[in-house]
Image (cartoon, rainbow, N blue to C red):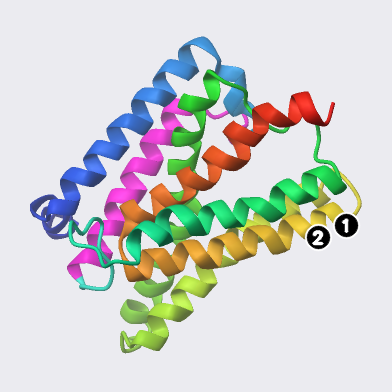
Amino acid sequence: MPALQRSLRLHPGGLAFAAISTVAAAFTAILSRYRPALFRPYFGDAHPLFVIASAIVVGGTGLAFLHSRGWFATYSPRHDSLWPFAVTVVPTLLAVPAITADVLLGFPRDMNVLAPDSLLFYPAIGYVAEVTFHLLPVSLFLFVLTTAFKAPASNRLLWAALLFAATAEPLFQVGFSLSWHPFTLLQGFVGVQVLMFSVAAVWVFRRYDFVTMYLFRLVYYAWWHIVWGTLRLHLLF
């Protein structure tokens, strides 16, 4: 473990990971002091600071492992010409069917955290989501198969790990919803929509780095939860 931690710390990505982790922790600390109820639907009775601290430890360990093997980058300062399109246009386009479904099928009125709390909440919850649903499954999948089962780390195996991770969030969201309500067309849409988002996100992780994947989610959240989350209350209700 110390070797993995040194590997991440000495890499430029270590500074980037430390920066976004600090921001996510600071935002969580502020909201947990003044609006702790915002986290309860997601974290249950767990203290938000415990959750974010756990995510930082898990995320740092996972990225250190992946970087030490040369499989994925935490942050790469050099990006190709497709990077701006991948990190801004793609998540923006993915928000369009979600907004359309809200207009046609109708999500609950209180599904979003509203501004100004949303400006702190979604960067924090997005950090936890990326670690939990994408980084952790990829790291565990590759650790188990390459360490316990001695599988060669081929490009096919790396993509298998990414596709495995892409199913985690849609399965969680649909499964959680089904525990409270019978299956509906809206839940079916959510499963497909989140799967599409997750596949695109892990593609970004593979092509670029973890920081880009996190930014990808933030852009999507900005349109879907923050901008549309405010407009929908005036247009639909």
Residue linked to disc 2 = 188
Residue linked to disc 1 = 185
Secondary structure under the numbered disc 1 in the rendered image: helix
**Residue 146 higher or lower than 192, as above or below:** below
Can residue 110 be seen in this snapshot? no
- Tell me where residue 134 appears, x and y as whole percent: 47, 59
- Tell me where residue 198 appears, x and y as whole percent: 55, 62
Amino acid type, label 2: Gly
**Residue 128 higher or lower than 30, as above or below:** below
Query: Do the residues under discs 2 and 1 have CB atoms within 8 angstroms?
Result: yes
Query: Are there few (<14), some (14-19), or many (20+) residues within 10 Å of tag 2?
Result: few
Residue at figure coordinates x 39%, y 48% from the top left: 215
- Tell me where residue 25 appears, x and y as whole percent: 36, 29
- In this view, the residue in front, 75 or 1, is 75
Can residue 229 be seen in this snapshot? yes
Which label is found at residue 158? Answer: none
Give the magenta part as a residue range: 43-68
Q: In 3D space, how far apart are the residues under numbered discs 2 and 1 (Cα atoms)?
A: 5 Å
